[in-house]
Every structure is written in C-alpha cells, then in structure tokens.
Amino acid sequence: MQVTETLTEGLKHELKVVVGAHDIAGRVAGRLAELGRTVKLPGFRPGKVPANLIKQRFGQQVMGEVLQETLSETSQKAVQDKGLRPAMRPQIKVTNFAEGADLEYELSLEVMPEIVPGEFGDLVLSRPVVEVGEADIDEALQRIADSNKRFKPAPEGQLSAPGDQIVIDFVGSLEGSEFAGGKGTDQTVEIGAGMMLPDMENALTGRRTGDKFEADVSFPADYAAAHLKGRTAHFAITVKDHKVREPVTVDDDFAKRLGLADLGAFREDLRKRLSDDYGRISRARVKRQLLDALAERHSFVVPGGMVDMEFAAIWRQVKGELDSAKTAEPTGHAHDHEHDHEHQHDRDHDHDHGHEHHHDHAYDHDHDHEHHAEPAPQSEEGTKLQLEYRGIAERRVRLGLLLAEVGRRNNIDVANDEISKALLARARGFPGQERKVFEYYTKNPTAMQEIRAPLFEDKVVDHILSLARITDRTVSIPELLREPDDAPPADDGAKAEAPEVKAEEAAPAPEKPEKKKRASSRAKKPTATEG
C-alpha cells in the first residue's frame, strides 16, 4: 500500500492511497476459495464446484465485498500511520478499481484541533440559591388543590360564573356563511380559564343549561388563522350542561387521598421536592455561567464538517417550527391562540452544549458519505437567521470538543451501570413499551450515545465546578426563575411562576417551570441538554 499526502490545509488533510493489484487479487482469490468450500450448486457436491464457475457466479459480489473490506482496513491504517486523529468519519472517493488493476482512492478528512484546556482554579462563579419557606409550600399545596378540580351539577336555575364548567355546541359564521373550523359539539369549557377568546367567555357567563343564544366574537389581528385575523364572527350557541366546582379542603384527608400519611408528611415531602427542583435550576444557572466563561477563555479552529452537521440539525428544527407557525390552523375555533411559545433569543447559554463529541471512530467507511449541505437562504432575514444559528453551532461544537478533551485528560468516563440506570429512566417514559425501548437503544450505538453523552457532560462539568471558586448567593424565587437576560420585574416581590406540582396517585416531583416569554417571530433555539 502506498500513501501520499496531497493536501494539508488547516485541519483538512487529503491522502492518495494505492493498493496493489496483486494484493486485491489475493483477497479475491481467498474469498472465492472460501466460497468454493461451502457453496452448494445444483449438480455438484459441496466443495466440488469448479473454480471458474464459482468466479462466474460470484465474482462481482466478491469484488464488491473485497472493495469494502479493503477500503475499511487500508484507510484506517493510512490514517494511523500518518498519526492523524480524525474529527469525523473520513470521506473516500474511489478513482480506480477494476479486475487486474490497482485500487486507487482519495481519502479526505478533518482532524481534531489541538486543544489545551486552561486552568479552572481561577474561575469565579456565583450560585443562586433559594430557601423554601412555609409560604412557598402553602402556594404549592394550593396549586395541587386547584389541579384536583371536581365539579358537580349546578343547582337548578343557577347562572354560570367564572370557575364553572359548561358544555356547549356552537356554529360560527362570517357574513352569513359558516367557516372552516367554526363548529363544535359537546365542547367542555371552564369559564375564566382562558380557554376561549374574551368575547366568547363573556357570552358564556350568566347562562343556564338549555339556553340558546347568539354572540359576536372578535378575533385579534395576530390570530393564528389568517382567515379570522381581525374579523368578527357570529356564533349560535347552545348550553347543554352546567357544573359548579366543589371546594377542596387541604387537610389530612386530602393528603391521604394522595398517598401521604397526613398533611404534615405532605408538607415535608413538598419541601424536599421543591428544594431539589430549585437546586436543579440553580445548577443550570451555574452551568450557564461556566459555559460562557469557557467560551470566552478558549478559542481554537473547529472542524467545518462538524459545524455543518450541527447547524443542519439546528436548522431542521428551526425551519420546522417556522413552517408550523406559518401553517397553524385553529383547533379550538373560538379559542385564544396566543400560546407564548418561548421563542427566546439569548444567543447560546443553556443551549450550549450537549453533544459529547466522541472521537474513537470505528472506521465505517461508506464511500458515498452523506453531505450535510447548508440550506439555501430565501431572504435577507433568512440569511441573517442562518448566520446567527451557524454561530451557535460553531460555539456548541467548540464547547463540546473542549469538554471531551477535559474528560479525556482526566480519565472521566461513564460506567455501564450509570448508562443502564439512565436507559431504565428513559424506558419508563413509554409505559407498556419498555422492552422495545431497551432493544432499540441496545441495538443502536448512535442512539445509545444519546443516553451516554449528557451523563458524560455532567461529569465533566462537575469536575470543572469542583475546581472553580463558587460562592452561594441567596436570592428570591422570582430572581432564580428569571432568565439571566430578562429585564428585572417591576416589583421584585411579585409572585413568580414556581415549579409545577401535580397531584396524581401520590405527590410527584415538581416539574421544571415553563417560564413565560415575550412573543417573537423567531423560533426557539433547540436545547441540546437539560441544563
């Protein structure tokens, strides 16, 4: 085998590899001989099929197998002999391959950049922490009580009011003609819950079961359905049922219904769960500071191919969200479609970086390597948006390579039992399909990497944080929940949206809060990991 380096430009390398015809012929002959010992053909005993007939029947197949085998073995050896450390799977282009001739191919690859992690002992980070007080537990208990809504039939003749539940049929029309999506049957509505547009909610207040009436409903100028924006529709409405809410008393009996011993035990359980949840948010804030600091301290060239792949993944999600927003149709007819989609534009932060770029590649050389072309911009705004997201992709890749290098230098790894535990947690999210989930991940190395990568990243981040100087700073819950780039609230003592605590069969762990964002025309940047 002859290897000639034809290009060295930054991280890009190109090699020309020639494998002699004699070597190829030997490989082909060996494979044909192996087939001859086992193949079965009509009229011949096993092992007695003439060699020329074996070659005639299986020659092309064997040549293909030899090509793939030779490319895999020789390309890996060529890269190793040159002392190169590929950042991604090399691309192979066969330039000559025929019976009796040398195999010639070009091998193109980008190598890993030289990464020298800085010292972490001089990193100064601030960790926001909150103390869960009795008032916070009271609020959580009330939210659980509110989520345990029970309704009973309204007293005969009682008028509907906010907080009541009614069932309605309705038919909407524009200028005397019914419009698409303007009809509903047996629609359950809780008055005052914001399920319907304001005009509709007002019209449903003060009604009884059996009432039939008409109402005009104005749609906002930014309504999702284009044919309803800024228009007023006329609705014919029938009230079919009316229920009022039963009061829920937060006491020992309420706690027992949720699987706790008494109200005291319920409060302690909530205290722990809220503390744990706020602790996770606190860690996310510290991690965000850390990633920003690492990005500022480390600057090195990253492989363009990795940036292309990262950008393509981001752009697919962004474009999908933008397309969905354009084609959104009303699903609730008179419902309010102002969804608060969390379209945030703080440029990296929590979105950097979840991908652990693992670079011990097993040279699976498909020579028709998939190219990740950048989407063509369709407008000036589209071009600006792509440039913005490409910058995020580059930052993600740089941080991922840095964290991988820190992990490599410090022998940080993820144990099999840790992966199994994470996989079990993932499978539990698919009740009844746990076995299929296990089989999917265990048989798919790429999918299994999705399980391992965030575990590895967390370990590396924890290692760096253990070396940094971190000071705890007591903050209010609103301050902890506020995104770092958000403007401070007018009243810092105002209630913020706390982690959601649901009441199911037992008191579950609180979920991470879904913080309201101001609306934006841009799509949400995809999050690689949960902070």
Image: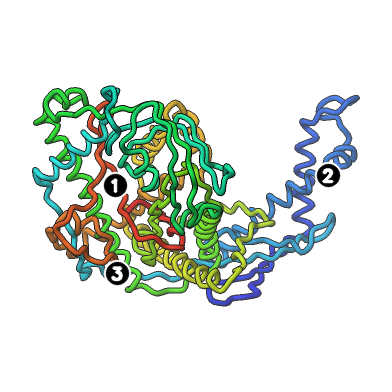
Residue at 27% of width from left, 26% of height from top? 505
Image quadrant of residue 519? Answer: bottom left
Secondary element under disc 2, as helix, strand or loop, is helix
Query: Which residue is at 64% across, 57% downward?
Result: 370
Look at label 2 and name its amino acid: Gly
Element type where label 1 sits in the image: loop
Residue under numbered circle 1: 512
Spatial separation of the CA atoms under disc 1 and disc 3: 25 Å
At label 1, counting other C-alpha atoms closer than 10 Å, the crowd grade (few under 14, some 14-19, many 20 or more) is some
* Crowd rating for badge 2 (residues with CA inside 10 Å; few <14, some 14–19, many 20+): some
Q: Amino acid at mark 1?
A: Lys
* Residue 352, visible in the rendered structure: no
* Callout 3 amino acid: Ala
**Residues under numbered marks 3 and 2 in contact, where contact means CB atoms less than 8 Å apart:** no
At x 19%, y 64%, the residue is 490
Query: Could you say where residue 326 lies in the image, as x and y percent from the top left?
Result: 54, 56
Q: Which residue is mark 2?
A: 59
Q: Is residue 354 above or below residue 15?
A: above
